[in-house]
Image: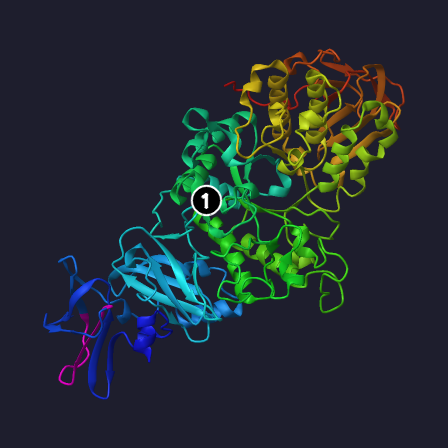
């Protein structure tokens, strides 16, 4: 029976038939080999050779003896091409996945299971080879197929490890690197070829095969960075993130418009971010994905950097290089859903293995994708293992978790009658909530200093509160409300803004309910929304640039960490397209150069005053001066530190009208130095300002005994800092290092 199944490519217990066995006093060796004329068993101890009998034309050989006890052996073959080979038999080795590993995987206590599942180069009993392991509990049989066996599923069938659902096989002597897939006969008897969910690298369409043998021995050089990160306090530090899509940041036009490789972008991006003063790079998803139009947000390979820009070793070089420049690397990570591609996770073994079987829970209507079954131990472990793998193998510094809102609610993007309530009758996805808590606790415990960020658009409570205090455990949350209100306000014609003044002040009502990041992301410059610059209402590009500088000044001085999508820093005018490079040629124009210089100086202002980062999430770090001047569309507020002199005054004029003799109350008597002015000529402004600063008048205003008489340029943000007394350390008052031109 087993022999027939083997010849038909449907053998579910190959180790019970192949290899060496002792039964009823008879020692039997069986081997199933491709393209082989003859085969013999070689005793590794005595070097005795025992010819095997060929039982079928497809390559089944057998030798048996009542006189010889079982012994360590090799197989010696003569191939159809006349070559001879002596090698280890794959079916003589014990499993490479232990019973305890399998138990922990099923129990949901194996977040390091990427060490066991997938394809790994190992030495077993002194023999080098590749171990393969895959979870497919409802498959009838599973084989490893690849270039090494001409993709024939009859050869190298895997064994099931008890009731764990894991299939395993160690194949000795495979070449250094090669392609493979798993050939499954699924629950319904249908044969399928599947990519390895735990693969460390993939090839592209149309094959989508996995690669084995790509574990590199990369020598890292970021020890200093990693030590510093482990002792960091992200909540109390300035964080300014440059959000990047690697495929379109820069392209090589002369070479068929190809994107930069990981190694090429490593130095260019690191140098650029260093010169601009960004603290981190956030990459749109680089986990392997098949569909270019998804920008990576429909992931099929949760453990592998996309092949599009190079190898996994190349990506390690990318991270290492940025760390060497003092730049952190954050990944967009998508545990919220996955595509329906038949080569990947969908109905992996003929059943809904990674997704829910009920489409009211398991299908994402809005995106045409599938939702993970977070209630399944193995699925939670798969996802957490993915995160751990990126932190461990690639030294990344954290994750921006995509589409958290869709994970938290069972009725997300669903009409009444299209969703199933939880066990208590509510709409919260309790299993997903527990997964997110587990993810945050485990990653922070084993990789101190990393940051996790939630992209979440509702008011779900305590996302950034620690789990032990009843929260979900994220470090930060994108402030989607601030983003929508701010862009909505500034997209209006200035004459109408006074009627919508609450849009620009409302964010302070919930500012300290979470630890926020102010994000102007890729989502705001696609799908017909236009670029940030184009959304500013004046028709004249120079005036648009004035207004955008004012917006950036408001953003960088408002409480919260900062995140800006690439191109925004120099006023990309066209809407972002993932197939084309940013329009770097715009920097030939003064207004675009001025915008980039402004972002550089804002980053310098922010990073040179660590107390600003400390106060990003502390109510004491902010104080309104006048939030209610709607008639002039002007905001004024203070950012303040722990020391009495650590105070900066910010005034934002959101109209095209300059205002002379504009009086603002301040809490300290003395000289206030103008340190930033978006209307400065260095930014291609009109150079309207306050002659370097102003001294207070003893005139009460805005609830303070002293005030400043200021000039407010049109469409401008100005920043004044209280002048320290003689002898006070003034080094922190300097702006960032000189701007590095290209």
Location of residue 487 (image quadrant): top right
Location of residue 49 (image quadrant): bottom left
Q: Which residue lies furthest to the front in this view?
A: 57
Q: Does the magenta stretch include residue 740?
A: no
Pinpoint residue 476: horizontal percent, then vertical percent: 65, 45
Pinpoint residue 48: horizontal percent, then vertical percent: 9, 72
Location of residue 699 (image quadrant): top right
Pinpoint residue 213: horizontal percent, then vertical percent: 33, 52
Specify how the rendered protein is coloured. rainbow
Instruction: Give the residue drawn at x 68%, y 61%.
Output: 429
Q: Which residue lies furthest to the bottom in this view?
A: 24
- Does residue 583 appear left or right of residue 51 in this picture? right
The front one of 576 and 570 is 576
Pinpoint residue 590: horizontal percent, then vertical percent: 61, 14
The front one of 715 and 175 is 175
Count of numbered labels shown in the rendering: 1
Instruction: Give the residue drawn at x 81%, y 38%.
Output: 506
Can see residue 513? yes
Q: Does the magenta stretch include residue 64?
A: yes
Q: Residues within 10 Å of mark 1 (few under 14, many from 20)?
A: many
* SS at circle 1: loop
Q: Quadrant of the N terminus?
A: bottom left
- Does residue 638 appear left or right of residue 684 in this picture? right
Q: Name the residue under label 1.
A: 306
Instruction: Give the residue drawn at x 72%, y 37%.
Output: 483
Vertical position of residue 714 compared to residue 311: above or below: above
Instruction: Report the magenta residues as a range.
Output: 58-73
Can see residue 604? no
Vertical position of residue 530 compared to residue 34: above or below: above
């Amino acid at each position: 029976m087993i022999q027939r199944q083997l010849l038909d490519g449907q053998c579910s217990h190959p180790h019970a038939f192949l290899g060496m066995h002792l039964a009823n006093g008879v020692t039997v060796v069986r081997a199933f080999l491709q393209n082989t004329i003859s085969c013999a068993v070689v005793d590794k101890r005595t070097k005795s050779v025992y010819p095997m009998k060929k039982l079928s034309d497809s390559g089944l050989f057998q030798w048996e003896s009542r006189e010889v006890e079982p012994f360590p052996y090799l197989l010696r073959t003569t191939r159809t091409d006349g070559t001879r080979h002596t090698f280890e038999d794959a079916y003589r080795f014990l499993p490479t996945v232990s019973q305890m590993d399998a138990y922990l995987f099923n129990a949901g206590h194996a977040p390091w299971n990427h060490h066991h599942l997938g394809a790994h180069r190992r030495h077993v009993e002194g023999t080098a080879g590749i171990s393969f392991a895959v979870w497919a509990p409802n498959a009838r049989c599973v084989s490893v197929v690849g270039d090494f066996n001409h993709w024939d599923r009859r050869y190298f069938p895997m064994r099931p490890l008890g009731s764990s659902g894991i299939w395993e096989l160690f194949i000795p002597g495979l070449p250094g690197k090669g392609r493979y897939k798993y050939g499954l006969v699924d629950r319904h008897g249908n044969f399928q070829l599947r990519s390895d969910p735990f693969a460390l690298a993939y090839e592209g369409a149309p094959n989508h095969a996995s690669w084995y043998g790509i574990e590199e021995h990369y020598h890292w050089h970021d020890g200093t960075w990693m030590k510093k990160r482990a002792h960091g306090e992200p909540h109390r530090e300035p964080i300014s993130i440059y959000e990047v899509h690697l495929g379109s940041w820069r392209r090589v036009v002369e070479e068929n418009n190809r994107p930069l490789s990981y190694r090429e972008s490593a130095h260019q991006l690191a140098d650029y971010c260093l010169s601009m003063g960004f603290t981190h790079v956030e990459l749109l998803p680089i986990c392997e994905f098949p569909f270019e139009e998804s920008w990576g947000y429909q992931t099929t390979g949760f453990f592998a950097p996309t092949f599009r820009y190079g190898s996994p070793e190349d990506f390690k070089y990318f991270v290492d290089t940025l760390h060497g420049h003092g730049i952190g690397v954050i990944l967009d990570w998508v545990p919220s859903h996955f595509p329906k591609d038949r080569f990947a996770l969908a109905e992996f073994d003929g059943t809904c293995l990674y997704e829910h079987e009920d489409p009211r829970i398991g299908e994402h209507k809005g995106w045409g994708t599938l939702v993970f079954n977070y209630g399944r131990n193995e699925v939670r472990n798969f996802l957490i293992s993915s995160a751990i793998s990126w932190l461990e193998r690639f030294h990344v510094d954290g994750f921006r978790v995509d589409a958290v809102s869709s994970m938290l609610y069972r009725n997300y993007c669903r009409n009444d009658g299209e969703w199933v309530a939880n066990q208590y009758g509510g709409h919260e996805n309790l299993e997903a909530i527990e997964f997110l808590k587990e993810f945050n606790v485990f990653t922070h415990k084993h990789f101190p200093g990393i940051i996790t960020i939630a992209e979440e658009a509702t008011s779900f409570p305590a996302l950034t509160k620690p789990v032990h205090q009843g929260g979900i455990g994220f470090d930060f949350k994108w402030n989607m409300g601030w983003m929508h209100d701010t862009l909505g306000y500034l997209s209006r014609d200035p004459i109408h803004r006074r009627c919508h003044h609450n849009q620009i002040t409302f964010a302070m009502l919930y500012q300290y309910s979470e630890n926020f990041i102010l994000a102007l992301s890729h989502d705001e410059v696609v799908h017909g929304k236009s670029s940030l610059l184009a959304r500013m209402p004046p028709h004249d590009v120079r005036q648009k640039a004035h207004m955008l500088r004012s917006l950036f000044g408001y953003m960088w001085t408002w409480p919260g960490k900062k995140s800006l999508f690439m191109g925004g820093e120099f006023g990309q005018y066209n809407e972002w397209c993932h197939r084309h490079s940013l329009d770097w040629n715009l920097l030939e124009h003064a207004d675009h150069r001025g915008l980039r210089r402004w972002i550089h100086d804002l980053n310098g202002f922010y990073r040179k005053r660590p107390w600003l980062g400390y106060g990003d999430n502390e109510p004491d770090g902010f104080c309104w001066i006048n939030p209610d001047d709607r008639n002039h569309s002007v905001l004024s507020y203070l950012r303040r530190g722990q020391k009495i002199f650590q105070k900066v005054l910010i005034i934002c004029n959101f109209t095209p009208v300059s205002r002379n003799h504009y009086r603002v109350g301040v809490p300290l008597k003395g000289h206030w130095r103008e340190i930033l002015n978006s209307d400065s000529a260095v930014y291609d402004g009109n150079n309207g300002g306050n002659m370097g600063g102003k001294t207070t008048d003893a005139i009460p205003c805005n609830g303070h005994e002293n005030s400043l008489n200021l000039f407010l340029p049109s469409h401008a943000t100005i920043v004044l800092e209280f002048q320290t007394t003689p002898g006070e350390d003034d080094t922190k008052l300097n702006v960032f290092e000189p701007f590095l031109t290209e």
